[in-house]
Amino acid sequence: MQPASYHSEPQYEEEAKPFAYDYAVNDHYTGTNFAKNEKSDGHNTQGYYSVALPDGRVQHVKYVADNYGGYNAEVTYEGEAQYPEYHPAPAYKASAPAYKAAAPAYKAAAPAYKASVPVYKPAYSSPTPAYKAAAY
């Protein structure tokens, strides 16, 4: 006995519908260049796309897809791959700044007050001893 599945099998009640679309982008400023075209009669799909590769070639793909044959593609390339000579970036050494850090333009202010001397006198005086020192 197989364990129960957590998810039920999806039920597709809708009939596949025919469609067709295409688009293309060719931006000379950024070098972005790609296109796609696809159409379907609801059962068989066929299409084409192309894309500019980083090595300078253009890849073209023609494909056909259906429920029986799966996805079948014919891939071709236009142009020849270009691999420019590698030039490592120059060794960069940060230079020392041409300026000196500024010293603070202020000095701490001296206190503007003087501590005052107490002006009160104690209201009591030391008591005089009430005993006499013993004679030897």
Image (tube, rainbow, N blue to C red):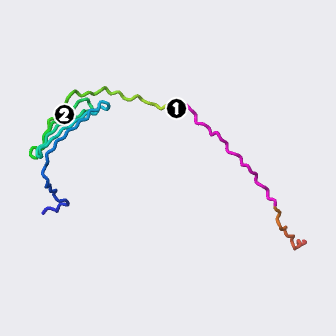
Q: Is residue 22 left or right of residue 88?
A: left
Q: Nearer the viewer, residue 45 or 101?
A: 45
Query: Which marked residue is nearer to the observer: mark 2 or mark 1?
Result: 2
Q: Which secondary structure, mark 1?
A: loop
- Which residue carries the number 2 mark? 60
What amino acid type should be assigned to the residue bearing mark 2?
Answer: His
Q: Residue at x 22, y 31 (%)?
A: 58
Q: Which secondary structure, mark 2?
A: strand
Q: Is residue 71 visible?
A: no
Task: Give the percent coordinates (x, y) of residue 103.
Answer: 62, 38
Task: Give the percent coordinates (x, y) of residue 89.
Answer: 38, 29
Q: Is residue 108 magenta?
A: yes
Q: Is residue 36 visible?
A: yes
Q: Is residue 105 left or right of residue 42?
A: right
Q: Residues within 10 Å of mark 2 (few under 14, many from 20)?
A: many
Q: Quadrant of residue 133?
A: bottom right
Q: Nearer the viewer, residue 42 or 79?
A: 42
Q: Nearer the viewer, residue 105 or 50?
A: 50
What amino acid type should be assigned to the residue bearing mark 1?
Answer: Ala
The segment highlighted magenta reads: 96-119
Task: Give the percent coordinates (x, y) of residue 27.
Answer: 29, 32
Q: Quadrant of residue 63?
A: top left
Q: Nearer the viewer, residue 128 or 103?
A: 103
Task: Give the percent coordinates (x, y) of residue 91.
Answer: 42, 29
Earlier-in-chain disc, 2 versus 1? 2
Q: Residues within 10 Å of mark 1 (few under 14, many from 20)?
A: few
Whether pointer 2 and pointer 1 mark residues with C-beta atoms closer than 8 Å, the reply is: no
Q: Is residue 67 left or right of residue 59?
A: left
- Which residue carries the number 1 mark? 96
Disc 2 and disc 1: Cα gap in Å?
A: 53 Å
Q: Is residue 21 left or right of residue 114?
A: left
